[in-house]
Image (tube, coloured by chain):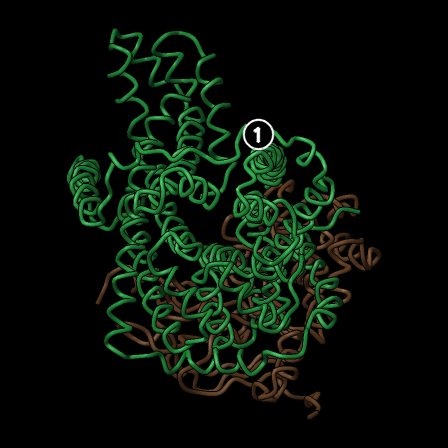
Amino acid sequence: MVKPEPAAPLLELRQITVAGRDRPRLEALDLRICSGERVALLGASGAGKSTLLAVANGSLPADAGQVLWQGLPPARSARQRRRQLARIGTLWQDMRLIEELSVQQNLNAARLAQWGWPRALLNLLLPLETAACAEALRQMELDPALLPQPVTALSGGQRQRLAMARLLRQQPSLLLADEPLASLDPRLATQLLALLLRQAQAPRALLLSLHRPDLLVGFDRVIGLRQGRLLFDCAAAAVDGACLRDLYGAEAAPP
Amino acid sequence: MRPAPPLLLLLPALVLLPLLLALPGLVHGGGWDLIAEFAGAAFTPSLDPVVLQSLLAGLWVTVAMALLGWGTSLFGGLLLGLASSRTVWRTLVGQELPAAVIRRLLAVPRSIHELLWGLLLLQLVGLQPAVAVLAIAIPYAALVARVVSDLLDALPTANLEALRASGAPAPAALLTALGPPLLPGVLSYGGYRLECALRSATLLGVFGLGGLGTELKLTLQSLEFHELWSGLWFLLVVMLLLEAGVGLLRRRWTMPRRFALHQAGVGRRGREMLLALLALLPLLLAVGWALGVDPVALGHWQPLPGLGSGRWQAVLSLPWLQLVGGTLVLTALATGLAVGLAPLQLLLAAPWPWLRRLVACGWVLARLWPPPLTLLLLLFVLKPGLITAALALGLHNLGILGRLLRESLDDQSPAVQEALVAAGSGPRLALFYGGLSGVARSYLAYGAYRSDVMLRETVVVGLAGAVGLGSQMLESLSSFAWDQLAALLVVYALLTLVGEDLSDRLRRRLLRQA
């Protein structure tokens, strides 16, 4: 197996294009994210934020261009590709918890990439790796007593934290998050964002799409996406009103 | 330590272990060349016009019998369903007791498999097309009646009471308040029964009641595999057309309005259904006339020889415990095989789309073939007995359960599976955790219902030698031992009624937890 280069960026997109119905959903997009970076992804609805994240986590193949994970293209062998994917954790907008399973079983589902069938089957029968699961919950400020509960018994805020705890349980080096704060009230959104940012320190990196320019504090870089193209890529402090008007303003009046 | 849903789904497959262990001992050595010849003939069916003509004639008879039996059972079942509905009796006469009585009585025709009805009627009135039609219509009508009355009594009655309170007469209030919400369920179930009727008509043919089934069995017994396959391909085309047509109508008529792309006119759906029902009547009459169904001939009963001679000693000396035990073991093995193998096959095939399609094709063939024909094929290489019979019964039902599992997986959002794949888990584990979790309970609930069907169907594989009540019944029937047969029928009916009750409880429990 080829070892990933330690110095290589965790994610590198080169000239990525994804075709769409009327115009490309992404067009000739370049992006590098290195270890320790916390990057916010801004853009109006339909600007291509979700598409970009889907290309980054390997669930959507690009029509043109190259994706590199830790300096390596997606592996040809299924086994090695899965090993690459296991290093990338995604926090989905709809959370994608398995409703029929308990909290602990859901947390352990993040380990399926490493586990073979025996442990995958045992997980459905017995509580496995309870200490690690409890630790993941604690990091997200959830009570470990929730472990045996069914997921359906959790509140909306608890579910969001559980999804994040599952992300930690996967032990990824690159964290991707698709508008994780969209359906939360302002207080909860700030809290969760702080938790997520705390987890995303070197050697990890974070790419998080969001709708709210007021929550950029704590990010190192901000990327603006408009109609599938990169509009700006700058330090968080450099984002000002003019940038945001460019990003959102023109979208309101169709060309 | 309660197994979680996806694991629950694999538990029935544990039955495969004893089956696989027993299988080597069952192989009797010869016959593999016959199986190979049979498989090869699939691609070279006979194109001889004489053969094709006779097969097409048989196909027409089978389809006509299925259509007539189904139509009769639908009309009869609707009426009986109304007659056994608590809501209807309460609204009309203010008394629920008659509903309960009629419901109990209907359990008897329901508990006896259509094959037994067919063979009994055959003895009573001799061979004529109406025998197969009636054999299908009697148990099916009782089944439809049960579903209709269950659906009716589960409907909320607030609308009905409001109409009654405003002075509407009882029949009009019933029709207005309960008719529209009842229709989609009845249509959906009715379509499913038509598919069942085609399978039943083929099966009855295998036992000599005419149509394609008879031709299939004769060609198989004379080892004319090429002609057999011509017939199977015909049957396959008809079955797939039927399944597609029923699915189309179901989607057109039962799709909730808000999903429809364009707003149809008010009452369009109702008008279409009514027209279809009205068109069905003359169609059924025409088919009946062309098939030569003669209601008068049904009146000429032959006296049953030997009944009343009362050799009850001989009846008592039957090995009852063994017979009932054999029937139960056969049902359990076949159920485990059918319920457990479908998810296992999907898991094994998960990484390769082509293999998934191949598995689905296998399921089509499995539900197409009547179990006794599968049994005859298996007997080329296996010794007769309980396990061989369970294989034949289980494989047939696997085709039906597999289709259901695939459809409910397709209806489910793939989001969770995609998330698991994106986090690096393999396609099999992603399907297991992300896909099968969601469908496990409803699939097992259907499996519980299907086990009840399989208990009734054990008679169909009775040809395999001493394997329970079914084979003893076929034997008693052919030796005109009517007293034995009567006792066997009573025991069998009791057993299926108990089985129905148990599977109902299991099903309700599974669905309540969902």
Q: Residue at x 45, y 66 (%)?
A: B365
Residue positioned 46% across, 27% down in the render: B106
Q: Position of residue B483 (x, y in %)?
A: 58, 33
The residue identified by callout 1 is: B309
Total marks in image:
1
Chain B hue? Answer: green
- Provide the chain ID for the residue under circle 1: B
As helix, strand or loop, the secondary structure at mark 1 comes to loop
Work out whether residue A107 can be spotted. Answer: yes
Between A149 and B396, the one lying in front of the other is B396
Quadrant position of residue B416: bottom right
Q: At 62% from the left edge and 81% from the top edge, which residue is drawn?
A: A10
Q: Quadrant of residue A248?
A: bottom left
Q: Is residue B242 above or below residue B102?
A: below
- The outermost residue toward the right is A131
Q: Nearer the viewer, residue B147 or A51?
A: B147
| Residue density around tag 1, few if under 14, some if 14–19, many if 20 or more, within 10 Å | few
Amino acid on which disc 1 is placed? Ser
Kindly indicate which chain is depicted in brown in the rendered structure: A
Query: From the image, which quarter does the C terminus of chain B lie in?
Result: top right
Q: Residue B285 at x, y = what percent?
A: 18, 41
For this rendering, which residue is in front, A49 or B288? Answer: B288
Q: Can you name the residue that lies furthest to the bottom here? A: A2
